[in-house]
Image (tube, grey):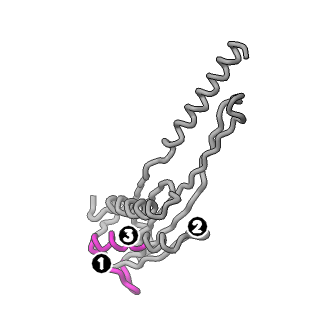
Amino acid sequence: MSTMARAKAIAISGVTAGVLLLIPGLSYAQKITSDWDKKATFTGYKTYTLSQGQLPPGANPLMVQRVEAGIKSELAALGLLSAETGADLTLVYHAATKEDVSLSTLGYAPRWGGGQVNVNRMNGMLVVDVSETNSKSLLWRATATDTVSDNPQKNEKKIQKAVEKMFEKYPTAPK
């Protein structure tokens, strides 16, 4: 192999290794956003009803239970009570998943074979909408996004953390 060809192979191998080193950094931290009606006072509400919105096909019922338990816990901490009928607030939660990310190396490395590296990651999103029951006007929306793990215990912790962070942003008094 010529010196030039050897240098090119080393450079390509270095690029490939650099791309592979980036893979662990692809797991993004949870992102929480919220928005609310700036004219709403968020006082005087005592009761809520919670319902399921859209969920991904084949959603794990245990994860759904954990989402609901987390939301109910946060609402109780805010002093809100669950009500079957006549609730002041209506909460609807939605979830979605999306497979994401594909990386390719920049060339062909003779010693390593082909030049393609694929990395797939599943992203999850949880959305909680809070509306005034009588007027049906949206008061608050929070969204959490994170990567989904193959480990159910990790997902349980991520759900709990996401719901807690979402409700940290819930406006409990006029600004």
Which image quarter is the N terminus in? top right
Q: Is residue 152 above or below residue 23?
A: below
The spot of residue 142 in percent (x, y) is: 42, 61
Residue 46's disc number: 1
Q: Quadrant of residue 73?
A: bottom left
Q: Select label 1 or label 3 by which is in front.
A: 3
C-alpha span from label 2 to label 1: 31 Å
C-alpha span from label 3 to label 2: 19 Å
Q: Is residue 110 above or below residue 40?
A: above
Q: Which residue is mark 3?
A: 70
Counting residues from the N terminus, which is met first, the one under dot 1 or under dot 3? 1
Q: Secondary structure at mark 1?
A: loop
Which image quarter is the C terminus in? bottom left
- Residue at x-position 41% and y-position 54%: 32
C-alpha span from label 1 to label 3: 18 Å
Q: Is residue 37 visible?
A: no
Q: Which residue is mark 2?
A: 56
User: Front-most of 132 and 159?
Assistant: 159
